[in-house]
Image (cartoon, rainbow, N blue to C red):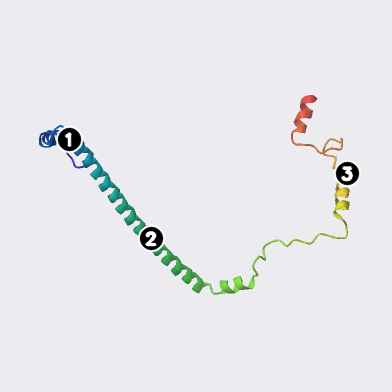
Amino acid sequence: MFDIAPSELLLVAVVALLVIGPKDLPLALRTAGRWMGKVRRMSNHFRAGVETMIREAELAEIEKEWRERNARIMAEHPDAEALEAAVPPGADEPVMEPLDTADPPEAAAEAAIARPSSGADGGDGEPELPLSGAVKKRRA
């Protein structure tokens, strides 16, 4: 980072040991570490602020470009607004029919129960489950 050679670092450590003294050197190193931490936090906060401003500027630029393209497309195809106004909202949704109230629900349920099976179940009158065919094959 700063391109400090090991010999230069050793020289700084010896000078600090002589100037500060062995008794106060740990306190001095702790204080220097706290200062470095504060500097790093402040630089990270500044960097995050700059990146946020850049993102906001890019977003504003993209939004401006989108509005220009939208205006150009709307100018090229003025009939699109008329088509959207002519189609009622929800026209593509399926319409639900009302239930037939002439037959009570109990009669429809009884008719469904009494309806004969299709015969694909093997003829025993019960519907075939997906695994029941495999069980029948093992038994045979």
Percent coordinates x, y for residue 105 in the rendering: 85, 54
Q: Which mark is residue 56?
A: 2
Look at the image and tell me in which quarter the N terminus lies: top left
- Describe residue 97's horizontal placement relative to residue 62 as left or right: right
Packing grade of label 1 (10 A; few <14, some 14-19, many >=20) is some
Determine the CA span between mark 2 and mark 1. 47 Å
In the rendering, at what x and y percent does residue 17 appear?
13, 34
Q: Which residue is mark 3?
A: 116
**From what the image shows, is residue 79 above or below residue 92?**
below
Q: Which residue is mark 1?
A: 25
The residue at the point 41 percent across, 67 percent down is 64
Callout 3: SS: loop
Residue type at the position of mark 3:
Pro
In the visual, does 101 lie left or right of 92? right
Query: What is the x, y in percent for residue 44?
Result: 31, 49
Numbered badge on residue 68: none
The Cα–Cα distance between marks 3 and 1, rounded to whole angstroms, is: 96 Å
Are dots 3 and 1 in contact, CB under 8 Å? no
